[in-house]
Image (spheres, rainbow, N blue to C red):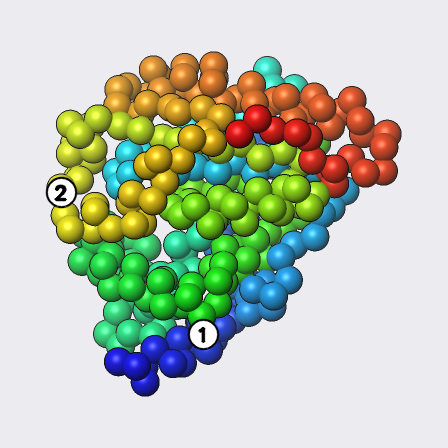
Amino acid sequence: SAAGSSFLPGVVLSALAQGPAMASTPVSGNHTASAAPVGARAIAAPAAATAVPRVAVVLSGKRCCGKDFTCERLFELLAAPEIGAVVAAQRIAISDGCKRSYAHATPGVDVDRLFADRTYKEQHREAMIRHFREVDTRCPGAFLDAALGAVRDEPGAHLQVLVFTDVRRTHEVSHLRQLHAAGQFRDLWALRVTASIDARRGRGWELQPVDSLYTETELDDYHGWHAVVDNSSSVEEFDDRLRRMVVPLVLSSVQSCSTHMHHATCGCVPRDLQY
C-alpha cells in the first residue's frame, strides 16, 4: 500500500541497525567472509580508503549460475601457498541487507530461512525484488552503501579483496566504478559468470516470471566485463578457468601495490581500467 511504502526507508535503517555485527568467519587460509549490512550509519558513510589496498571483484550472473560458488572457489585459489602474498578476502552480498529489511517489514517472514532455504527464498523472490525497488527508489544505493560500510580492515594483509557476489543493476556497477575512481579501491575487476541451461537446471533452476525481471536481465547487454567465466562443467575445469582468467587479475593488483608500496597514496590512487 502507499501508506506502507512511505515508511520503507525507516524500516531499512531499523532492520540494518538491529543486532551486533557478525564476526568474521574463516573461509580458508587468510580469507574471511563478511556478513552484509549491519549498521544504519554505513548507508551515509561508505568505508574510507585504508592503508591496506582494497580490490573490488564484481560478480554478476543469472540465477543458479554459481556466483556464490565462484566466490568460494576464488577464495580457495587465493589461499594457495604459491600465491606468495597475504590476501584477505571478504564476501559482500548486497542482497543480504535486502533480505533482512524485507523480513523486518513483512510479518511472518523467517529471515533465517531466507538465507538457508533456497526454495523458501524463491517463494519470496518477487516480493523481495519489489521491496528492493521501493527502498532503492527512496534511498538510492542504500543496500550497497550499507554493505560497504560493514567492511572491516584486515591489518597485516598485502591486499584486501572484496568480492561482490550479487551485482544485478547497471547503477550498482556505476556506483562501484565511481568509488574506484574516487580511490576507494586500488583496482576493480568485473566478472560475468555464465552456465548452460542444463547446468542451471541441475542446481535447481526452473524458468520463472522473475527471470524476465530487470534484476535478471539489466546487465545482459553490459560489455564492461574483464572476464566471462563459464561454470557449466566440473569443479576442476572451473578452477582451471579461474586460475587462467581471474587469479592473474587479482595478482596483478598485489604486484602493483608491492611496487608502489613506498608511496603514501598506495591503495588510494586507482589504476586505469579498460572497460
Instruction: Give left or right: position of 14 versus 3.
Output: right
- Image mark for residue 207: 2
For image coordinates 17% across by 40% down, the residue present is: 205
- Comparing 93 with 29, the one in front is 93
Spatial separation of the CA atoms under disc 1 and disc 2: 32 Å
For image coordinates 29% across by 64% down, the residue present is: 130
How many marks the image carries: the answer is 2
Q: x, y percentage for residue 76? A: 48, 27
Determine whether 270 is above or below 138 in the image.
Answer: above
Work out whether mark 1 precedes mark 2 in sequence or the reverse, and give the earlier one.
Answer: 1
Displayed quadrant of residue 261:
top right
For image coordinates 46% across by 29% down, the residue present is: 225
- Comparing 36 with 29, the one in front is 36
For image coordinates 64% across by 62% down, the residue present is: 45
As shown in the figure, which amino acid type bears the numbered disc 1?
Answer: Pro
Specify the farthest residue to the bottom: 3
According to the picture, the residue beneath numbered tag 1 turns out to be 9
The N terminus is located in which quarter?
Answer: bottom left
As shown in the figure, which amino acid type bears the numbered disc 2?
Answer: Leu
Instruction: Give left or right: position of 62 versus 143.
Output: left
SS of the residue under disc 1:
helix
SS of the residue under disc 2:
loop
Q: x, y percentage for residue 133? A: 35, 62
Using the rendered image of the protein, determine whether residue 52 is visible from the camera's viewpoint: no
Q: x, y percentage for residue 67? A: 36, 37
Instruction: Give left or right: position of 109 versus 274.
Output: left
Label 1 neighbourhood size at 10 Å, few (<14), some (14-19), many (20+)?
some
Q: x, y percentage for residue 92? A: 49, 47
Instruction: Give left or right: position of 255 versus 103.
Output: right
Displayed quadrant of residue 222:
top left
Determine whether 209 is above or below 248 in the image.
Answer: below
Displayed quadrant of residue 100:
bottom left
